[in-house]
Image (tube, rainbow, N blue to C red):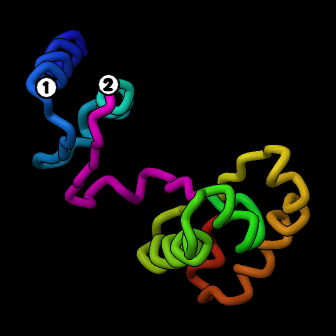
């Protein structure tokens, strides 16, 4: 990890603003998420490109912070609610487990009942195979 941290400092000094972590399978590196966090901390936009072989061993966390109106406002992006739900559907259709993430704040607390209802509402639109994966 020390070598990665030193390289990140060199990238920052060189003015690098964007990095793609890829390779054969970057998830094989045990500290890959620490590396990504260190890049983000230094203001370097980071993407993780994987080959998909290990993705079924993980749970994809996707944020849904309330109703469409609340979520879009909280995420400061119109249509982010729809994009989050589309991502959930895509993961489930590929057999990837999904963990629903909710940020509890003054602006989202009124949506908490909606979030709990989403599990049953969303699962009604899933295939039988998708229903085997918890949200």
* Among the two numbered marks 1 and 2 on one chain, the one whose residue lies closer to the N terminus: 1
Specify whether residue 31 is in view.
Answer: no
Say which quadrant the C terminus sits in. Answer: bottom right
Is 104 in front, or is 107? 107
Left or right, residue 42 beside residue 132: left
Left or right, residue 60 beside residue 66: left
Say if mark 1 contacts mark 2, CB within 8 Å: yes
Q: Residues within 10 Å of mark 2 (few under 14, many from 20)?
A: some
Number of disc labels: 2
22, above or below 41, in the image: below
Image coordinates of residue 16 in percent, x first then y, are 14, 34
Res. 70 image quadrant: bottom right
Image coordinates of residue 35 in percent, x first then y, are 30, 27
Which portion, as a residue range, is magenta? 43-62
Which residue is tagged 2?
42
Which residue is tagged 1?
11
Specify whether residue 6 is in view.
Answer: yes
Res. 15 image quadrant: top left
- What label does residue 113 carry, if any? none
Is 124 in front, or is 19? 19
Who's the residue at 11% across and 46% down the image?
Answer: 23
Image coordinates of residue 14 in percent, x first then y, are 9, 25
Who's the residue at 29% across and 29% down the image?
Answer: 39
Image coordinates of residue 83 in percent, x first then y, are 52, 74
Secondary structure at numbered mark 1: helix
92, above or below 38, in the image: below
């Amino acid at each position: 990890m020390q070598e990665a941290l030193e390289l990140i400092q060199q990238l920052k000094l060189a003015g690098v603003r964007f990095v793609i972590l890829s390779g054969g399978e970057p998830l094989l590196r045990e500290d890959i998420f620490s590396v990504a966090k260190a890049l983000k901390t230094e203001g370097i936009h980071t993407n993780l490109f994987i080959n998909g072989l290990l993705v079924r061993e993980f749970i994809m966390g996707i944020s849904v912070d309330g109703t469409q109106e609340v979520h879009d406002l909280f995420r400061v992006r119109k249509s982010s609610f729809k994009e989050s739900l589309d991502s959930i559907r895509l993961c489930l259709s590929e057999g990837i487990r999904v963990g629903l993430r909710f940020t509890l704040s003054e602006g989202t607390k009124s949506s908490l009942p909606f979030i709990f209802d989403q599990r049953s509402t969303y699962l009604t639109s899933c295939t039988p195979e998708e229903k085997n994966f918890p949200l």
